[in-house]
């Protein structure tokens, strides 16, 4: 691995841990947040160790790009979750906040929501 690739990988590794420290679960429940933070850290360690022995430049480049994409997805998801929470706390009527009629909102509320914890890291 070249020095620049090594530097980039270490930078990404540390970035994932910084994200994990500030991660907030979409549910807002403290235990969910702790569980998701632990998942992010464990997954990062596992995947980075798994790919530690890569020597092919193209494989390393692919893993770096995948990691950057996963970080971007995870951070964007966290931003959207925050916006969604602030909208739900506003003083708008329910149908104005969601854009759904009451029947559609009930159907939407009945659908299961993803926690998003697998979105941040799955670099192979």
Image: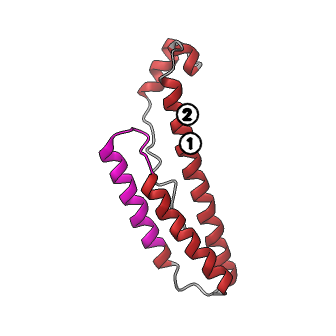
Q: Residues within 10 Å of mark 2 (few under 14, many from 20)?
A: few
Q: Is residue 102 visible?
A: yes
Q: Nearer the viewer, residue 113 or 79?
A: 79
Q: Secondary structure at mark 2?
A: helix
User: What x and y, as percent, mark residue 116?
Assistant: 47, 47
Tag 2 residue: 83
User: What x and y, as percent, mark residue 39?
Assistant: 38, 59
Classify residue 37 as left or right of residue 67.
Answer: left
Where does the magenta region start and end? 23-47
Within the magenta stretch, is there residue 27?
A: yes
Tag 1 residue: 79
User: What x and y, as percent, mark residue 19?
Assistant: 49, 57
- Residue at image point 49% right, 14% down: 103
User: What x and y, as percent, mark residue 50?
Assistant: 47, 78
**Hey, which residue is sitting farthest left in the picture?**
31
Classify residue 72 as left or right of residue 52.
Answer: right
Q: CA distance from mark 2 to mark 1?
A: 6 Å
In the picture, the disc for residue 63 is: none
Q: Are marks 2 and 1 in contact (CB under 8 Å)?
A: yes
- Residue at image point 61% right, 54% down: 72
């Amino acid at each position: 691995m070249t020095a620049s690739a090594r530097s980039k990988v270490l930078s990404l590794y540390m970035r994932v841990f910084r994200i994990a420290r500030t991660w907030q679960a979409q549910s807002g429940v403290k235990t969910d947040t702790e569980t998701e933070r632990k998942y992010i850290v464990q997954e990062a360690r596992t995947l980075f160790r798994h790919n530690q022995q890569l020597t092919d430049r193209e494989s390393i480049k692919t893993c770096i790009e995948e990691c950057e994409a996963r970080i971007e997805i995870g951070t964007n998801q966290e931003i959207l979750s925050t916006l969604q929470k602030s909208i739900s706390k506003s003083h708008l009527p329910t149908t104005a906040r969601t854009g759904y009629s009451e029947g559609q909102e009930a159907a939407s509320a009945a659908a299961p929501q993803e926690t998003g914890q697998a979105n941040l890291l799955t670099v192979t």
